[in-house]
Amino acid sequence: MSQYPNRSTITMLILSLSLLTFPQILFSSTEEIKFINLTTHWVGYVSIAIFAIAYVLVIAEEEIHMRKSKPMMVAAGIIWAIVSIVYSFKSDPAYHHTATVMIRHNLLEYSELFLFLLAAMTYINTMEERGVFDALRRWLINQEFSLRTIFWLTGILAFSISPIADNLTTALLMATVAMAVGGSNYKFIAIACINIVVAANAGGAFSPFGDITTLMVWQKGVLQFEEFLTLFIPSLVNWLVPAAIMSLTVSKEKPQAINETANMKNGALIVVALFILTILMAVSAYSFLHIPPVMGMMTGLGLLKIYGYIIKMGDKRHLKKIHYDNKGNSPKIEGDKYKNKTPFNIFQQLERAEWDTLMFFYGIILCVGGLGTIGYLSVISELMYVDLGATNANISVGILSAVIDNIPVMFAVLSMMPDMNTGQWLLVTLTAGVGGSLLSIGSAAGVAVMGQARGIYTFLAHLKWVWAIALGYAASIAVHMWLNMGNL
């Protein structure tokens, strides 16, 4: 036996020592702080330039092959470093802890978002590993539907699944179906992908689980869970208008069926049931117990891990022979049927989470928080929500989301916290969710599908139908204002 402590022991020791500083952290965060308006200071200009450069690198991710989290994380560190330098030179001690308190405030918001998404991503990865999505995809392929029917079915499913499974995962799943059915018919694949992206974004707009922006609004406590459901009809209109127009160009020919079979693995439906239960726990935690919904999600993740253990033990019983190599690595299976297979491991699904995306959110939240501490969010809030008015400002948010990305835009709005009624908060939630559909680069779903259908679903292919998508955008806003006129 080694005389040296293993890594787990060292990690636990470090965590234990770090907890000793926790009371000091709490104490320092409650001290009185003051702010400095740095919008016309060199720090403000440099911070804007750093953020702009980082975001250009994010937009160019597909060209330069550098993950989007890298420039954003560096930008966040630099912005807060130069802000802290200015505050540290002030003679008044009330300024000295401002940066620390604001960073911890942003980290708290990020930690809730991070843990919530980590639990959701692990569930999605587990359902994918158990073959749930593959079974759905192959069933659609084998039904011998016409291209126009597939166009509508993939759109309907994208709109229906995204409120639960998020718009990115749903768009990728349905795009796979469109590509498999379309084959060499690139025209159909392109228009089907446009329809899927619009439908997935629209479906995600009326559910806290459908998009990062709606999740942020819900976790912030601005809207209750049931209030999001009032956006169902406007979201549906947002998709149906361009879908009806685009469908006229899709032929009714029937592609040849692909005889594929897909069987879900043991426990697949139970994982789906646990995911639904987890969502209910998250909603109940917030609505009835008045605690952060992330508690319900993490409890559900714990249930999934326990069930993962049950699946793993069942796999072991069915595998003929298990042996470990001389280095103690994961079990390897011998035998004709189970050669090179390993028992189910829930932590492998945890590892498959979109870590680049999660780290990107860290960079975005810290960057926007830094610009807010400098004073820029107050200036923007004054320009948009006072000078333009809430309705015009919220409509502009959706258009801006198509160019920049709805996550930083929505986080900026939530950081500004303009004085708006429920109807206006619903409006900005709607526009931020569906505005990204105007351009292929305006949403995570669009960017992901462009990567999946590279060279077929492109920026220019999407741009050809921007007029139809814009009609859906305008129609959804009009329907929302008509249905919720009493709240506006």
Image (cartoon, rainbow, N blue to C red):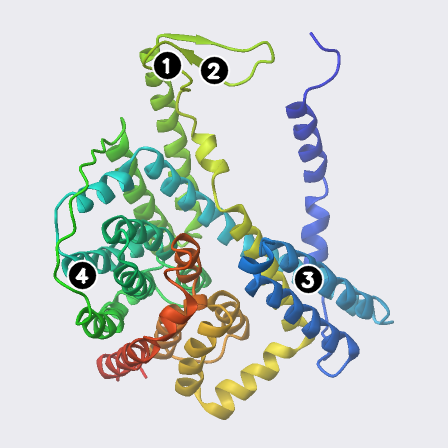
Classed neighbour count for the residue bearing mark 3: other residues with Cα under 10 Å, few (<14), some (14–19), many (≥20): many
Dot 2 or dot 4, earlier in sequence? 4
Q: Which mark is residue 331?
A: 2
Q: Position of residue 253 (x, y in %)?
A: 13, 58
Q: CA distance from mark 2 to mark 4?
A: 45 Å
Say if residue 22 shows up in the picture: yes
Dot 2 or dot 3, earlier in sequence? 3
Does residue 488 appear left or right of residue 248 in this picture?
right
CB within 8 Å, label 3 to label 4:
no
Q: What residue is rendered at 16% in x and 43% in y?
A: 142
CB within 8 Å, label 4 to label 1:
no
Specify the quadrant that holds the C terminus: bottom left
CB within 8 Å, label 2 to label 1:
yes
Q: Amino acid at mark 4?
A: Trp
Dot 4 or dot 1, earlier in sequence? 4
Q: Which mark is residue 75?
A: 3
In the image, residue 443 sits, relative to residue 379, either above or below, namely above
Specify the quadrant that holds the N terminus: top right
Dot 2 or dot 1, earlier in sequence? 1
In the image, residue 395 sits, relative to residue 203, either above or below, namely below
Q: Amino acid at mark 3?
A: Ala
Classed neighbour count for the residue bearing mark 2: other residues with Cα under 10 Å, few (<14), some (14–19), many (≥20): some
Q: Viewer-proximal residue, 301 or 409?
A: 409
CB within 8 Å, label 3 to label 1:
no
Residue designated by label 1? 316
Does residue 352 appear left or right of residue 69 in this picture?
left
Residue designated by label 4? 152
Circle 1 — which element?
helix
Q: Amino acid at mark 1?
A: Lys
Q: What residue is rendered at 43% in x and 46% in y?
A: 295
Q: CA distance from mark 4 to mark 1?
A: 43 Å
Q: Amino acid at mark 2?
A: Pro
